[in-house]
Amino acid sequence: MSDKKLIFSGIQPTGTFTLGNYIGAIRNWAPLQEEYNCIYSIVDMHAITVRQDPVKLRQNSLEAYALIMACGIDPEKSIAFIQSHVKTHAELNWILACSTQFGELSRMTQFKDKSAKHADDVNAGLFTYPVLMAADILAYNADLVPVGVDQKQHLELARNIAQRFNQKYGDFFTVPEPYIPKVGAKVMSLQEPTKKMSKSDDNPNACILILDDKDTIIRKFKRAVTDSDMEICYREGKDGINNLMTIYSAVTSKNYEEIEKEFAGKGYGDFKIAVGEAVADHLQPVRDNFTRLINDKAYLKECYTKGAEKALRISQKTVSKVYRKVGFVDAR
Ligand code: TYM
């Protein structure tokens, strides 16, 4: 790897990605490949912190891998792999767990939300989830981590874990910085625009999936909840319109002022259709690429196998050094 700064990010294979995943995270991954050394992972070990159907999980992981490639991740430029293929993540997870406090894990809002939602399965993996995330990042000494706003708290914890380890054992880990986009770091639900857009939403109209066809996308936008006002402008209290403006801005690169001008005097109905069309057109190449890639299983396998080999080579070095630092006897 060259001297460029290192990026690490991951996404859970829990079904087709949402427009939130896309705008808040993945669409920023491809351009970063030109400037940084990038490592991207399909984090299947994180996914099993909530109950998964094994057959579906396997299929979702392959689809997720094909999807990140469909969004422009080039396995020749970046290292792209499936988390469970690289055993060092689990190994480092244990060491880091011993530098993480019960109290700080208890404060994680995602744990509170998910344990309320899955009250019948509040397992230890769900609780220690952010430690594995820290292991993902620290195994490569990543400098930057591109994520949406909802992952900021986990990243703060990863930084604290790195700093604590460095204090205990001497400077070793790079303390990672979050890399959060200016527009679209939190895309909201189309049905309840004060809540983040999420694939686990019970209402299918709340969430755009990036493989939805054009008609479905437009239909969901037409049903988007707005307000009783008539003006298309970005203003506090206009959560629904603000969200649509953010989405439109993210896919057209127009700023809010330009959007306000474009739709001055027009109604919400016209605006919703325009947003739907812009999103569907923007996502069309992703859908086309995905269809091609998912039908070439041999190529996908070649890519994720090579990706895992490269990831293991790098992270193995980190873990060996960590083992020595904490006082484990050399295995060789
Ligand atoms: P996950 O799989 O929930 O989401 C993947 C990425 O999508 C972003 N995102 C959003 N951004 C804007 N608006 C939304 N509505 C929205 N919903 C999701 C997330 O912020 C994330 O960047 N714990 C992580 C996966 C992970 C990871 C890592 C990330 C595991 N290890 C190491 C970075 C580094 C997660 O569950 O993301």
Image: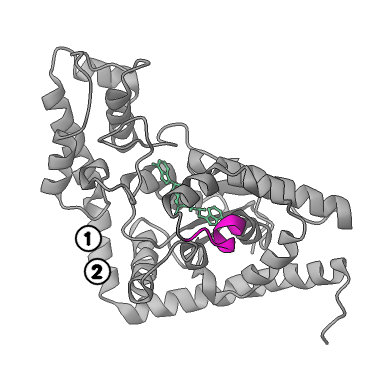
Looking at the image, residue 122 lies above or below residue 228: below
Task: Name the residue beneath numbered marker 2.
Answer: 292
Kindly identify the amino acid type of the residue bearing the numbered disc 2: Arg
Q: Which residues are magenta?
A: 121-129
Q: Indicate the secondary structure of the residue bearing disc 1.
A: helix
| Quadrant location of the N terminus in the rendered image | bottom right
* In this view, 166 is above or below 183: below
Residue depicted at 64% across the width and 53% down the height? 4
User: In terms of image quadrants, where is residue 247?
Assistant: top left
Q: Is residue 176 visible?
A: no
* Residue under the point 42% across and 65% down: 51
As shown in the figure, which amino acid type bears the numbered disc 1?
Answer: Asp
Decide whether the magenta segment is chiefly helix, strand or loop: helix
Q: Quadrant of the C terminus?
A: bottom right
Residue under the image location 27 percent in, 62 percent down: 289
Magenta segment includes 8:
no
Residue 128: in magenta span: yes
Q: Name above or below for residue 149 compared with residue 283.
A: above
Mark count: 2
User: Which residue is labeled 1 in the image?
Assistant: 288
Distance (Cα) linking label 2 and label 1: 7 Å
Q: How many residues crowd mark 2 within 10 Å: few (<14), some (14–19), many (20+)?
A: few
Contact (CB < 8 A) between labels 2 and 1? yes
